[in-house]
Image: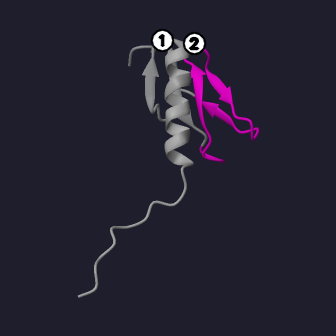
Amino acid sequence: MPELTGFAVIGCSKCRRIMSADLSHATKTCQCGHKLDLKKTKLLAVFASADDAAQEVMRMQERKNTGFTSAVKFERV
């Protein structure tokens, strides 16, 4: 398997926080204290620059934290 370079968007398996990680490192420590092995962690997206990865993290967090999504409402007959 080829070595990946750049920056990845990952999710913490303990607290589900979305964050970016530099792929030149072997591990990433989440704010909750959980240490993630980047070779075993699912990479949600990979970017060449940290700025692009940060933009994707913000977009994913916004989508995740927007709250309740209602089901399609049916009209009563």
* Residue 21 in the image, given as x and y percentages of width and height: 59, 23
Q: Is residue 34 above or below residue 55?
A: below
Can the viewer see residue 39 in this picture? no
Q: Is residue 44 visible?
A: yes
Whole-percent x, y for residue 7 in the image:
52, 18
Where residue 67 sits: x, y (%)?
A: 55, 56
Secondary structure under the numbered disc 2 in the rendered image:
loop
Q: How many marks?
A: 2
Looking at the image, which is closer to me, 27 or 11? 11
**In the rendered structure, are the residues bearing label 1 and label 2 in contact, judged by CB atoms less than 8 Å apart?**
yes
Hey, which residue is sitting farthest bottom in the picture? 77
Q: Amino acid at mark 2?
A: Ser
Q: Secondary structure at mark 1?
A: loop
**In which quarter of the view is residue 62 placed?**
top right
Q: Residue at x 28, y 85 (%)?
A: 76
Q: Which mark is residue 5?
A: 1
Query: On the rendered structure, is 74 left or right of 28?
Result: left
Precedes in sequence: disc 1 or disc 2:
1
Q: Residue at x 61, y 40 (%)?
A: 12
| Residue 24, disc | 2
The span picked out in magenta is: 13-37
Where is residue 55? Give x, y as percent: 52, 24
Residue 11 lies in quadrant? top right
Residue 24 is inside the magenta segment: yes
> How would you rate the neighbour count of disc 2 (Cα within 10 Å): few for under 14, some for 14-19, many for 20 or more?
few
